[in-house]
């Protein structure tokens, strides 16, 4: 598949196409600055290896300006100042509905914007970010994938050999915004599903997805080694969207109106 392409299952959850089902997603609301927040985590399994895996879908205004992004994915850091946080978002590179993935201040470096277009508000995209600073080649230490394919365009050459990933693995985590409570918040208009952070293992995308009939689809993440600080958010409990299903009980707090109505029967395997 080309970057940005995605298959929408016309059969919904009743189809036999999917061996593993994701039954719901969580809709984030930019206007109310709703997000999920987790304060400092515990002792990490490793500061040198880890993996993000989650599915996202855009909605709202796709023609957002770079100074006020409406599609922030996540952030992590130690202070409320923007310079103290790393964040990842989908934003327009020039003007009009031309969305790219932007890695700003990611691990003390600005990785820039990816190649490829991500501007389809009906499509679900699977993002995997693999970090492994033990790799001898700098190009292998921080890698981004969409729908199982490695992204191009990012500059990750500044990740040093055996460098620690402190911000990702010991400090505050925010899903759906740049800043924590008490500071100016740049929120998001997005859907998220099956949100996973792995502490201590750098997984390939095939740990969480697979190709079937030429289509990248979700895969049962059972057997994933989450490590001490890992978490798995399914958004299945409307009274506790931040519930961690990994077994670590790394639950998130729900901020600013993520009520039961924000759970949506629209997911990578359940057509909306």
Image: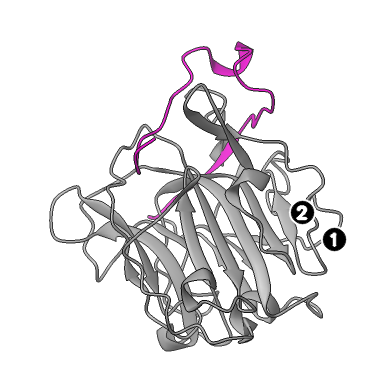
Marks 1 and 2 sit apart, C-alpha to C-alpha, by 7 Å
| Percent coordinates x, y for residue 168 in the rendering | 61, 75
**Residue at 52% across / 12% down in the picture?**
11
Q: Which mark is residue 64?
A: none
**Residue sitting nearer the eye, 17 or 265:** 17
The answer to whether residue 250 is above or below residue 108 is above
Q: Identify the image quadrant of residue 4.
A: top left
Q: Which residues are magenta?
A: 1-30
**Residue sitting nearer the eye, 55 or 174:** 55
| Percent coordinates x, y for residue 150 in the rendering | 44, 54
**Residue at 40% across / 32% down in the picture?**
6
Q: Tell me if I can see residue 74 in this picture.
A: no
Decide: few, some or many residues near mark 1? Use Cα within 10 Å; few <14, some 14-19, many ≥20: some
| Percent coordinates x, y for residue 209 in the rendering | 60, 39
Left or right: where 50 falls relative to 215: right
**Residue at 39% across / 50% down in the picture?**
189
Q: Secondary structure at mark 2?
A: loop
Q: Identify the image quadrant of residue 12.
A: top right
Whether residue 260 is in magenta: the answer is no
Instruction: Determine which residue is flagged by label 2.
Output: 244
């Amino acid at each position: 598949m080309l970057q940005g392409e995605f298959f929408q299952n016309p059969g919904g959850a009743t189809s036999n196409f999917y061996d593993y089902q994701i039954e719901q997603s969580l809709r984030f609301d930019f206007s109310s600055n709703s997000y999920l927040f987790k304060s400092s985590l515990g002792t990490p399994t490793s500061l040198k290896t880890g993996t993000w895996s989650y599915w996202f879908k855009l909605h709202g205004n796709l023609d957002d300006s770079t100074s006020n992004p409406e599609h922030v994915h996540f952030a992590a850091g130690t202070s409320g100042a923007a310079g103290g946080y790393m964040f990842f978002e989908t934003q327009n590179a020039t003007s009009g509905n031309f969305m790219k993935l932007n890695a700003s201040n990611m691990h003390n470096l600005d990785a820039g914007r990816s190649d490829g277009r991500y501007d389809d508000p009906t499509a679900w995209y699977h993002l995997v970010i693999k970090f492994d600073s033990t790799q001898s080649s700098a190009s292998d230490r921080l890698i981004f994938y969409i729908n199982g394919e490695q992204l191009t365009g990012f500059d990750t050459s500044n990740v040093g050999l055996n460098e620690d990933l402190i911000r990702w693995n010991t400090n505050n985590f925010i899903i759906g915004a740049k800043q924590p409570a008490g500071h100016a918040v740049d929120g998001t208009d997005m859907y998220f599903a099956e949100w996973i952070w792995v502490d201590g293992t750098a997984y390939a995308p095939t740990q969480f997805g697979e190709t079937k009939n030429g289509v990248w689809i979700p895969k049962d993440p059972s057997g994933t080694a989450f490590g001490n600080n890992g978490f798995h958010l399914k958004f299945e409990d409307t009274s506790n969207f931040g519930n961690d299903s990994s077994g670590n009980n790394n639950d998130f707090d729900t901020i600013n109106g993520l009520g039961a109505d924000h759970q949506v029967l629209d997911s990578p395997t359940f057509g909306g």
